[in-house]
Image: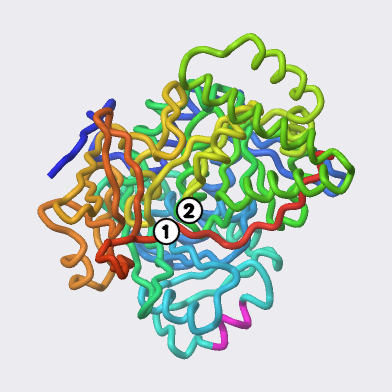
Amino acid sequence: MKQFTSPPQHESRPDENTTDLLLGRLRSNPSVPIYELLQADGSYTPVSTADFIDEAKRVAKGLIASGVASGDVVAILSRTRYEWALMDWAVWWAGGVSVPIYETSSPNQIQWIASDSAAKFAVVESTRHKEDMESVRGDLPELLHIGVLDDGILDELKTRGADISDEDLEERRTSRRLDDIATIIYTSGTTGRPKGAALTHANFVDTTRSALNLLGEQVLPPGSRLLMFLPLAHVFARLITVLAASWPVTTAFTPDTKNLLGDLAAFKPTFLLAVPRVFEKVYNGSEAKAVAGGKGKIFTAASQTATAYSKALSAGKIPFTLKAKHALFDKLVYGKLREAMGGQVQWAVSGGAPLGARLSHFFRGIGVTILEGYGLTETTAPISVNLPWDVRPGTVGPPLPGSTVAIDENGEILVKGVMVFKGYHNNPEATEESMTDGWFSTGDLGALDEEGNLTITGRRKEVIVTAGGKNVSPLSSRISCAPIRWSASAW
């Protein structure tokens, strides 16, 4: 069995939990705003780490006063917004377990997730969401409260918890340790009911620290800006949001992707997290606009030059004529494309589906390096990611520090390490099926090169035998996100 190990670069204390990441940021980088909130006039108001922690504590006290005990489940059903992140941290401060539910979920889906997880408290975004949850409340015997963000549940919780002491709150915060479950994320399986992947505080703490130790200084230098528009109910966006809150990064949120272009222009992120479809939309939309404006040949030449430039970067030598052509197209084309993404983006991470070498080379060639990664809900998102100093388009890079990737005799990708989940909630049979001697079976097929870079080649259960007897497995992804609407206007 071929395998590759990336040694750990840190060691966490057993008594830590996810809240220690936020407290660590407060100690080391108190001056960089943790969030910026979009105002009605289009401006952004900064939120300091100290103020955010104070607000999370006040909400956490309200949860405790509402009867949420250590280890109890709080469900969060909302679009991606500041209040989602605030509730997540407040639940952890109260010693609870947060369970995300997509805001597009049907009442049947809500019922299954809330009942299987035994949710005691639910925070939903709107009256419509509350009505959906109320419609199945008869099947949710554990559920005590439903609060609505749009109706002011956060202020109500802050008032309700006024009599909870700081000492009681700290006792509750520290009641959870690395080995304890932090969240249960339900996978959108193709058959049967969704399975709840139980992720521990260690999964979040150690995966975050592993990623930051590896990439933080280069990809997210202090003062970096992240615009989050993917669903926070998804493990990919959730992990990156926690990671950004643990590091001197300022994050803003876009609840409605119809406003994405305007928010990019106003917030000017330096880092993006997206699925390949977003990058495809940028490319295809810009190409279509160029063709419609009679500049199709210019765009084609610019695209070919960007790709050639990226490949030359990988080879370590850029010919003079290519440099000159690249500089020309930077003024004519590339600068406009970067402006469509806010003008400041230098790095992006892509996951959720194969990006492909073509798009990877193109965006790198225009000045936006996309680090393609690979992971699953059961691995707290990232198993591996391309390294910024050794980008290998077409691969998803080597495993994160503290983990090992192996390819078994059938070509399946196995993984063990800091990111691997505790198991499926209330489903020991599925856990046993997916875990063998500490190895998690991903269900994906792949290959490892000598430097440990992983290439995804397909899905184990989708192997097709051709008429010639050849096994062919179509490419797929284990992490999927809601569709993203994007209309590029670089031309």
The range drawn in magenta is 130-135
Q: What label sits on residue 353 in the rendered view?
A: 2
Q: Quadrant of the N terminus?
A: top left
For badge 1, the amino acid type reads: Ser
For badge 2, the amino acid type reads: Ala
Disc 1 marks which residue? 476
* Quarter of the rendering containing residue 15: top left
Q: Secondary structure at mark 2?
A: loop
Q: Residue at x 81, y 26 (%)?
A: 332
Q: Quadrant of the C terminus?
A: top right
- The x and y percentages for residue 285 are 75, 49
Q: What label sits on residue 202 in the rendered view?
A: none
Farthest residue toward the bottom?
Answer: 138
Q: Secondary structure at mark 1?
A: loop
Q: Residue at x 48, y 70 (%)?
A: 121
- The x and y percentages for residue 300 are 72, 37
* Quarter of the rendering containing residue 444: bottom left
Residue 322 visible in the shown view: yes
Q: Main secondary structure of the magenta part?
A: helix
